[in-house]
Image: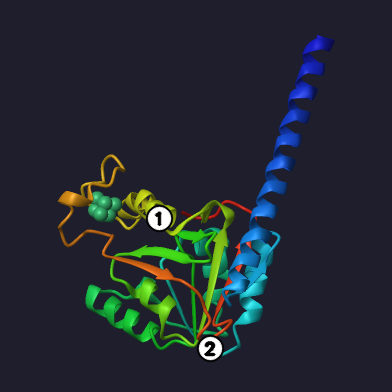
Amino acid sequence: MERIVFNTILARKDENIMDAVMKWDFENKAREIIDILNEKKFDARYAKDSNEAKKMVEELIPEGSKIAVGGSVTLNETGILSDVIRSPKYNFIDRYNAGSYENMIELYRQGLTSDVFVSSVNAVTRQGQLVCIDCTGNRVSSLIFGPKKVIVVVGVNKIVDTLEDGIKRCRRVAPLNARRIPHEGTPCFEDGVCKEEICRMKARVCNAIGIVDGCCYNPGRITVIVVPEELGY
Ligand code: SF4
């Protein structure tokens, strides 16, 4: 009996140690990518967890701002969408209550001239690039030009080495969007495997891949809040 208890304690201790090692690794990855992004003139910042990221987003958005968002699991998971973006102190261009496809497109168009665009991306490369894949392109275009200010929130699970890895990651996770939205009838919908070569229907979720390769023309326009957690996809 004593031996079983002792082994259980040891196993729990091992788990705690592994958790601590992983946390440390995540923190190192976050700080490393922040330095790389700042060197490319993004305004990259460290948030110790999702809660801190949420507070930082709120502090960055002036009251009364016209806000738009990119479709993002990260914004949902962190509570940024429900607790910050939907706050009555902002003027949220609410794409989630568009009512019709035509109105949704109109709201996307309005988002291009928002004061602040808040989003995540699908990958951040160690070459200092933000990479994302879109159905309509509203997120890709808003990241690149339009909104006066952009805030991107990312977990360390999205950090990859190269641009090629970033694009691969976009394509690997895209079937999850086909499921989430949902876009039934896409070739990846049932088995989660992209079959781009036969995907030509209107429901295709991958029509635009965007790369932001730096913020030198307007330093700090894009704030990237990096969280040492696994967030979204
Ligand atoms: S290209 Fe088509 S099959 Fe591939 S992930 Fe996108 S929607 Fe799915």
Residue at horizontal 23%, vertical 58%? 204
* Dot 1 or dot 2, earlier in sequence: 2
Image quarter of the N terminus:
top right
Query: Mark 2 = which residue?
Result: 65
Residue at horizontal 81%, vertical 11%? 3
Compared to residue 186, the image places residue 75 above or below, namely: below
Between 154 and 58, the one nearer to me in the picture: 154
Query: Visible in this render: residue 185?
Result: no
Across and down, in percent, residue 213 comes to 46, 71
Between 81 and 218, the one nearer to me in the picture: 218
User: Crowdedness of circle 2 by 10 Å Cα count: few (<14), some, many (20+)?
Assistant: some
Compared to residue 43, the image places residue 31 above or below, namely: above
Between 111 and 25, the one nearer to me in the picture: 25
Q: Give the numbered dot on residue 190.
A: none
Query: Visible in this render: residue 98?
Result: yes
Asked if the residue at label 1 sits under 8 Å from ligand 1, the reply is no
Q: Nearer the viewer, mark 1 or mark 2?
A: 1
Compared to residue 23, the image places residue 119 above or below, namely: below
Amino acid type shown at disc 2? Ser
Query: Mark 1 = which residue?
Result: 164
Amino acid type shown at disc 1? Glu
Across and down, in percent, residue 178 comes to 30, 53
- SS under mark 1: helix
Measure the C-alpha gap from mark 1 to mark 2: 36 Å
Across and down, in percent, residue 80 comes to 56, 68
- SS under mark 2: loop
Across and down, in percent, residue 66 comes to 48, 87
Q: How many labels does the image show?
A: 2
Between 115 and 170, the one nearer to me in the picture: 170
